[in-house]
Amino acid sequence: MGAIITLSLLGILVLYLGLYKAKSLLLPVSLLGLVAALGFEIVAWNNGTAPIYNGMVLFDNFALAFSAVCIVITGLVLLLSKEYFSAISKNVAEYYCLILFSLTGALMVCAYHNFAMLFIGIEVMSVALYILVGIRKTDFASNEAALKYFLMGAFSTGFLLFGITLLYGATGTFDITGVKNYLVSNPTAVSPLFYGGILLLLVGLLFKVGAAPFHFWTPDVYDGAPILITTYMSTVVKVASFAGFIKLFSYVFSPLQDFWTPILLVVIVITLFLGNITALMQTSFKRMLAYSSISHAGYMLFAIISLGANANSSILTYGLAYSLASVAAFAGLILVKRNHGSDQFVAFDGLGKTNPLLALVITVAMLSLAGIPLTAGFIGKFMLFRSAMADYHIILLILAVVNAAIGIYYYLRVVVRMYFYPSNTGDDKLAVPISFNVVLIITLLLTVLIGVYPNCLISLL
């Protein structure tokens, strides 16, 4: 709980620093606060943490591992922000503050033990993003993305709340252990309200993770938002949402797996094909990543339908691998777009010759997203596919492999352009700030480390 309190106070402190024009302190203070929050997580990991606030929040190994991933990825995003956000907005303090408040909500989603805390966490995480998506006030695409995200988010919240209401009506409790005990004690006499609650919760959660057919906001919002906000949304928000998703379905709803598994199977197939085929048709690198994030939501849903001892570690590994690769890819996009004024694939032409390190990191990120061996993405996909194989979802596995092959094609398009096309700017190098180099090297090393030695992460759970 120390991490949540630290981040909440840090957000207020950052806002006051902006009020008193101390902009030079915003990034150092934010990063120190993240280090302190991560330290609280490590201490809690070593000491063990009991349920707090009357059992509404539980920081067990599961919550601590996912919370640590969210904090680390947010730190990488903030490292990229100094150069980026000062150039596009005067609201720098507000940006840091809202990111920290959104991260606070993400940690609550990872650690909830009560439906009230799940709802509060999702709303704290999302409301800050409604503002961040539209923080470029003079950009009509950003304004449109913010409005669309707000309207769709409010609509999905209604489904989520209605689902929680039906579950409370059937069980008389918001505590997830109480809901689980209701299922265990009444396996053959479950109220129809309970089934309705599961369906409505599914709608709300599938919207948050960007799975089809509730994905329609994702490409436009990701494309219209500032690139760093898109980076945060596609990594931290997705990881936290899946943490809340799998906790609910593995811990509470597993006795009714025969009811909701067929629904998720259909959702996974639609999500994989829609995400990959539309990504294949894009000419914009940013929009390609937006559509591919839909397909990655489909892969991560494998852990939900294949509940077992390895489900949590599978989704943690895949979530971290996807997040590292996305941060590296979007960091490269920021630099390329700053130099060329375009996010089209053609803007990456000849990057392998002019900026070898940047091209190498983007290449490794694309290989990881595609699931090529010796990268973290391969380990994540292998673990998810192995889970599906153990439950004999053979047809689903075959369809997933077909989609993975499609993904390899469109991910390698940018690699081909970097190494086999002449540069549009001759031999001129992109200017890469030190903070970007730090992030690029960290993501590269972690991606390869997890790909070669995955036990360093899997053992956490």
Image (cartoon, grey):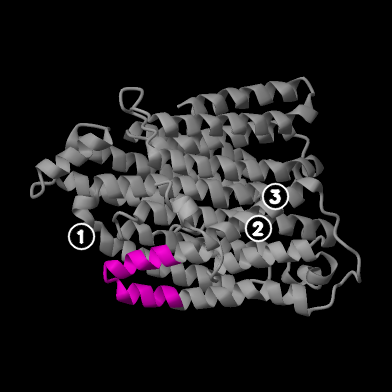
Q: Earlier in the sequence, mark 1 or mark 3?
A: 1
Magenta residues (range): 382-401
Residue 441 appears in the picture as rendered: yes
Q: CA distance from mark 2 to mark 3?
A: 8 Å
The answer to whether residue 84 is magenta is no
* Mark 1 vs mark 3: in front: 3
Foreground residue among 447 and 113: 447
Q: Which residue is pictured at 41% across the width and 63% down the height?
A: 383
Q: Could you tell me residue 245's position as x and y percent?
A: 37, 48
- Measuring 85% from the left and 67% from the top, which residue is drawn there? 354
Q: Which mark is residue 439?
A: 3
Q: Which residue is mark 2?
A: 444
Amino acid at circle 2? Leu
Q: Are marks 2 and 3 in contact (CB under 8 Å)?
A: no
- From the top left corner, tell me how far across and down residue 145 is, in percent: 61, 50
Q: Would you name the residue on which mark 1 appears? A: 258
Closest to the observer, 68 or 182: 68
| Three-letter amino acid code of the residue under disc 1 | Asp
Gap in Å between the C-alphas at discs 1 and 2?
41 Å
